[in-house]
């Protein structure tokens, strides 16, 4: 039996909510969207939430709402999903890549400050894998250098930094709801902010740039068709009612992995700092320097266990060549970590026997390779 890499957690209440939306007379921009937006805003602790059709759309509208000028520099990690960077390129901004901390894989505040130039205008922080970035340091740097701050929290709904839920940091934040996320709408995303201006602009731009008071076919600004449909919003509102249950389930799975993996000297389980509450998006282990990740992936897949390299650094990818220069070693921690990180099967309802099966497979692989100190692979 193949263990699924990820699975959504859908129950009869979710199906009933989507069916009710389908049976209503509003399939877009209706009461389900309003309910979902209010639920997320209240949970995060902000004034505004604006649904959109993807996390990428949420990031794009946040960036566009800042009204930056083409050529302005935005500090961003390379160890992230491509959308964090792509939305900057959409607006002809210049991404300046920042190295990461070797434990949490989030922006390294020291390197962040070192890469500020006279053209730097903003920071796009990312809460990688659901672990909050070092927000006190990031916001302090931003304040001293007069920089705008956005939070790509697409992987981190429900996480907290020093008792404050993510979504409250920076001028706006984005969450995403792909099926492998903490909650799902199928496809979808949301912008959260306390800024009336950012909320107003994002509401307009997601709906083809229509103004608040204008006629239906009058457009106040350039906009996009980034609306979330009512069926997706109904699913999101239903899922939000069980978010805390989902987070607890995911924490249980993560704890099960971590407890079982501690005895393997050739890999490191995820590090969670004591002043944060992690919202587990994926479970990513880090191999010891010099080991073959490809060999581990192949050996796991031969046993019916999928695994994925997470992340491929954006600055080293071929599509970035027209936008940024690349020299090997320019982000040494990012490049080292990206060669060694490996996501294991992870979802709300991953059974204990499946966790044990994955760990037993890793134990056997390590023994066969001689990585456990036995010398078997030598």
Image (spheres, helix red, strand yellow):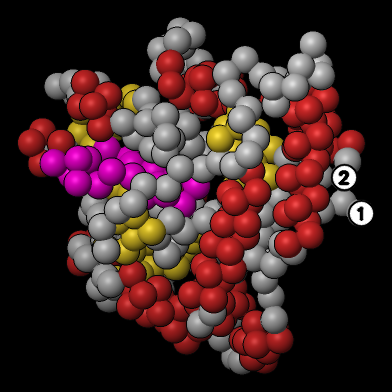
Q: In the figure, is residue 22 to the left or right of 56?
A: right
Say how many tags the image has: 2
- The tag on residue 1 is 1
Q: Position of residue 300 (x, y in %)?
A: 81, 37
Q: Position of residue 169 (x, y in %)?
A: 25, 55
The residue pinned by badge 2 equals 304
Q: Residues within 10 Å of mark 2 (few under 14, many from 20)?
A: some
Residue 16 on the magenta span: no
Instruction: Decide: is 250 above or below 233.
Output: above
Q: In the figure, is residue 315 to the left or right of 75?
A: right
Instruction: Decide: is 313 above or below 161.
Output: above
Q: Nearer the viewer, residue 5 or 34?
A: 5
Q: Nearer the viewer, residue 114 or 245?
A: 245
Residue at x 20%, y 34% (from the top left corner): 121
Residue extent of the magenta highlight: 123-140
Q: Secondary structure at mark 1?
A: loop
Between marks 1 and 2, how big is the CA–CA gap? 6 Å
Asked which quadrant contains residue 110, the reply is top left
Observer able to see residue 225: no
Observer able to see residue 373: yes
Q: In the figure, is residue 214 to the left or right of 11?
A: left
Verify CB contact (< 8 Å) between mark 1 and mark 2: yes
Residue at x 48%, y 16% (from the top left corner): 322
Instruction: Decide: is 76 above or below 205.
Output: above
- If you read the primary sequence from the N terminus, does the residue marked by circle 1 or circle 2 appear first? 1
Residue at x 89%, y 36% (from the top left corner): 302
Q: In the figure, is residue 23 to the left or right of 301?
A: left
Asked which quadrant contains residue 96, the reply is top left
> Which quadrant holds the N terminus?
bottom right
């Amino acid at each position: 039996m193949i263990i699924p890499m990820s699975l959504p957690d859908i129950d009869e209440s979710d199906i009933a909510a989507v069916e009710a939306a389908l049976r209503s007379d509003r399939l877009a921009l209706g009461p389900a969207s309003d309910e979902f937006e209010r639920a997320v805003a209240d949970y995060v602790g902000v004034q505004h939430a604006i649904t959109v059709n993807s996390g990428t759309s949420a990031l794009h509208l946040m960036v566009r709402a800042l009204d930056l000028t083409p050529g302005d520099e935005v500090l961003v990690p390379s160890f992230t999903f491509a959308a964090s960077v792509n939305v900057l390129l959409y607006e002809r901004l210049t991404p300046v890549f920042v190295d990461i901390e070797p434990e949490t894989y989030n922006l390294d505040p020291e390197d962040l400050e070192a890469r500020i130039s006279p053209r730097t205008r903003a920071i796009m922080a990312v809460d990688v894998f659901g672990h909050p970035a070092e927000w006190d340091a990031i916001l302090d740097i931003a304040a001293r250098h007069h920089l705008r701050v956005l939070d790509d929290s697409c992987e981190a709904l429900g996480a907290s930094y020093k008792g404050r839920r993510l979504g409250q940091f920076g001028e706006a934040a984005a969450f995403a709801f792909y099926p492998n996320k903490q909650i799902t709408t199928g496809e979808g995303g949301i912008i959260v902010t306390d800024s009336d201006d950012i909320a107003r602009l994002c509401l307009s731009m997601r709906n083809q740039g229509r103004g608040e008071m204008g006629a239906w076919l009058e457009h106040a600004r350039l906009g996009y068709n980034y609306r979330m449909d009512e069926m997706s919003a109904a699913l999101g509102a239903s899922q939000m009612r069980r978010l805390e249950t989902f987070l607890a389930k995911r924490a249980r799975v993560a704890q099960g992995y971590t407890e079982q993996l501690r005895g393997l000297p050739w890999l490191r389980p995820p590090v969670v700092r004591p002043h944060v509450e992690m919202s587990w998006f994926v479970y990513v282990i880090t191999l010891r320097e010099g080991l073959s990740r490809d060999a581990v992936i192949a050996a796991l897949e031969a046993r019916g266990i999928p695994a994925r390299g997470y992340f491929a650094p954006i600055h080293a990818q071929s599509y970035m060549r027209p936008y940024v220069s690349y020299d090997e070693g320019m982000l040494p921690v990012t490049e080292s970590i990206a060669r060694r990180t490996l996501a294991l099967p992870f979802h709300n309802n991953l059974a204990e026997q499946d966790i044990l099966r994955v760990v037993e497979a890793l134990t056997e692989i390590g023994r066969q390779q001689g990585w456990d100190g036995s010398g078997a692979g030598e």
